[in-house]
Amino acid sequence: MPEHFQLLKTDSVTAARRGRLQTRHGVVETPIFMPVGTQGTVKAITPQHIQEIGAQIILGNTYHLNLRPTSELVKELGGLHAFMGWEGPILTDSGGFQVFSLAKLRDIREDGVAFQSHLDGAKLFLGPKEVMTIQANLGSDIAMVLDECPPWPCTRDECARAVERSFRWAKQCKEIATDNGFLAGGHHVFAIAQGSTFDDLRREAAESLASLDLPGYAVGGVSVGEPEPEMIKQVGATTPFMPADKPRYTMGLGTPPQILKMIALGVDMFDCVLPSRVARNGLVFTPDGPMNLRNEKYRTDPRPIAEGVTNYTSRFSRAYLRHLTVAGEMLSATLLTIHNLQFFIELTAQARAHIEAGDFGAWHRAWIARYEAGAA
Ligand code: PRF
């Protein structure tokens, strides 16, 4: 058992796991939802709120932070934790995926990705060396390797090439993180298994990456446009071949039911912009499905967002929150972000409690049934 990750319990009915991950900035109890802080801020809330909603770890992003303000400046100012005033663990994505989705004129080569900044068109390049140096400059607790996420749908040949290249890049990232003392300093590096919709390529990706013996492993290339059953199938085709004694992370997922289904497949870590992004548009999550506060029917509603859901925002009425949202007040974004992120974080806390209690299987099915009945 590696000393940075303890597997405390595995569910007997599903593949759900209860674990504990040690980082340089503290312990993360898994399964866990991680709020996204792409630009060195979880949009609309302060680090004090991040702590108060129960977040144990947040995300940052190589692509964005290196374009602006640059990782060199962040390093000069003491690293990302000091720069943004967050003392807990930070996981950073490597940037390749954001190049594919944001940058102009990208060119994937064997040594990395050449692209033009979406901000000013500057010609830039990210290879294994660059992404590991940037993440070391940021002082990331968990750095992701550079990977190639093939589009959905893609041909088997395209996908096989992306899997092979992602393996080579992962291996180079590990070598760089070994040579520059990043791994020895207690920072973690996680590899990313691609493979699109091809089960055998997913297995090959997971098994070959496992041989690198890295501190953690991620499932990449899911939730890129494929239908939900396909997404769940892809995660289920990957997790059985990932090392059981290392943390597992699916990148960029999902809705509350999707998160519970992934936990049942043995995933430990999640991040998604969904709760914070839709909060800025007046959409909030409840145990009975999502709720659009802009709806006229809440104009005079004195009740909190959801009975039985207690957080800072629950002291305000639906009517007040609707008013703030319709009036375009900034406080709406803050209050609804607090509600949604705490909802996702508490969902994973409940999952942890039910894995410990031994009734996760029945609990997660009932939770999803109620949510979907309300959403219908
Ligand atoms: N790779 C990386 N980051 C990601 C993804 C990926 O495949 C995804 C896909 N769901 C989101 N973020 N490096």
Image (cartoon, rainbow, N blue to C red):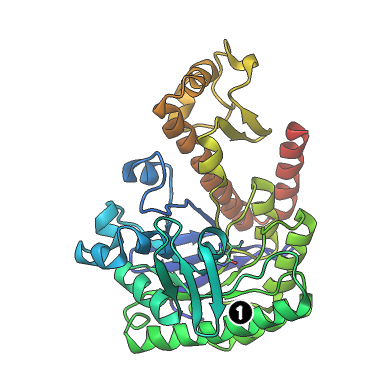
Q: Residue furthest top?
A: 300
Amino acid bearing label 1: Pro
Q: Tell me where residue 273 appears, x and y as whole percent.
A: 53, 49
Q: Is residue 206 visible?
A: no
**Vertical side of 174 occupied by 43: above or below:** above
For the point 75% across and 48% down, which residue is it?
A: 365
Q: Tell me where residue 16 appears, x and y as whole percent.
A: 66, 62
Q: Is mark 1 within 8 Å of ligand 1?
A: no
**Vertical side of 220 occupied by 132: above or below:** below
Q: Quadrant of the C terminus?
A: top right
- Using the image as rendered, state which of residue 183 and residue 350 is in the foreground: 183
For the point 73% across and 60% down, which residue is it?
A: 231
> Where ligand 1 lies, by image quadrant?
bottom right
For the point 31% across and 53% down, which residue is it?
A: 86
Q: Tell me where residue 90 appears, x and y as whole percent.
A: 39, 61
- Using the image as rendered, state which of residue 357 and residue 73 is in the foreground: 73
Task: Report crowding for label 1: few under 14, some 14 to 19, many 20 or more residues within 10 A (C-alpha).
Answer: some
Q: Is residue 319 visible?
A: yes
Q: In the drawing, does residue 185 fall left or right of residue 276?
A: left
Q: Tell me where residue 331 appears, x and y as whole percent.
A: 40, 27
**Vertical side of 208 occupied by 152: above or below:** above
Image quarter for residue 292? top right
Q: How many marks overall?
A: 1
**Vertical side of 173 occupied by 70: above or below:** above
Q: Secondary structure at mark 1?
A: loop
- Using the image as rendered, state which of residue 304 and residue 104 is in the foreground: 104
Residue designated by label 1: 243
For the point 58% across and 89% down, which residue is it?
A: 211
